[in-house]
Amino acid sequence: MRKFGQASVLSQKEWSKLESVCDVDYHKMIWSLLRYTGARIGEVILLKVKDVYADYDNRLIYDAITYRKENRKGKDKHHVVPICAQLKLLLRGYFQASESEWMFPSPIDPMKPISYEAVLFFLKRKSEEAGLGHLRITTHSGRRSCITELARHGTDLKTIQAVSGHSSLANLARYIETDPERTLNALEGIF
């Protein structure tokens, strides 16, 4: 059940639809980072190549992504998220053509990162194109989807908190979407 005003949690099928209409690699990579690391959009668009790749030219990827503290919402420490196998494959295939230090340079000025507005505009346009305009897809959908999927697969809350970087379990709990059928199945399973 989606709470009013929250970003939609996307199913695997909906993610596939969205990715199928995406014709720009760096937008697809941004969405993948949101989906597979549960990061905030501000953390992702401000990633530098050195935060992900030990050697970009040879596609040598670290085992974890470092979201630097200066790019995190109200945080005073770096947040390190392990890179799963699926994301590692996508990162190996990602090619950023400019000499920019940014993972996602602005198409207007490659010495600056892409703007939040540019990502949101592209995401909204591609959501409509994918036939998902009825959903409330925002740049936060990847984060909510990651957290909800981890919970649905039985991951304990402390581990999910380690992935998401939430400082409190109360804040984390707001991200986990519930499903009436799963709730009923849980109750049926214990009685």
Image (tube, helix red, strand yellow):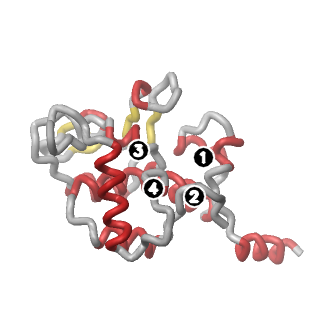
In x, y percent, where is residue 52?
29, 40
Q: Residue at x 25, y 37 (%)?
A: 113
Q: Which residue is mark 4?
A: 138
Closer to the chain start, of discs 1 and 3, is 3
The amino acid beneath tag 3 is Ile
Q: Residue at x 52, y 27 (%)?
A: 74
Closer to the chain start, of discs 4 and 2, is 4
Q: Residue at x 56, y 54 (%)?
A: 147
The amino acid beneath tag 1 is Thr
Q: Which residue is mark 2?
A: 150
Task: Specify the farthest residue to the right.
Answer: 191
- 70 above or below 171? above
Closer to the chain start, of discs 3 and 2, is 3
Q: Which residue is mark 1?
A: 159
- Rounded to the nearest angstrom, the CA distance separating label 3 from label 4 is 10 Å
Please identify the quarter of the rendering in which residue 168 is found: top right
- Rounded to the nearest angstrom, the CA distance separating label 1 from label 2 is 9 Å
- Name the side, left or right, on which 87 lies relative to 12: left
In x, y percent, where is residue 135?
50, 68
Q: Which mark is residue 65?
A: none
Front: mark 4 or 2: 4
Task: Specify the farthest residue to the top.
Answer: 76
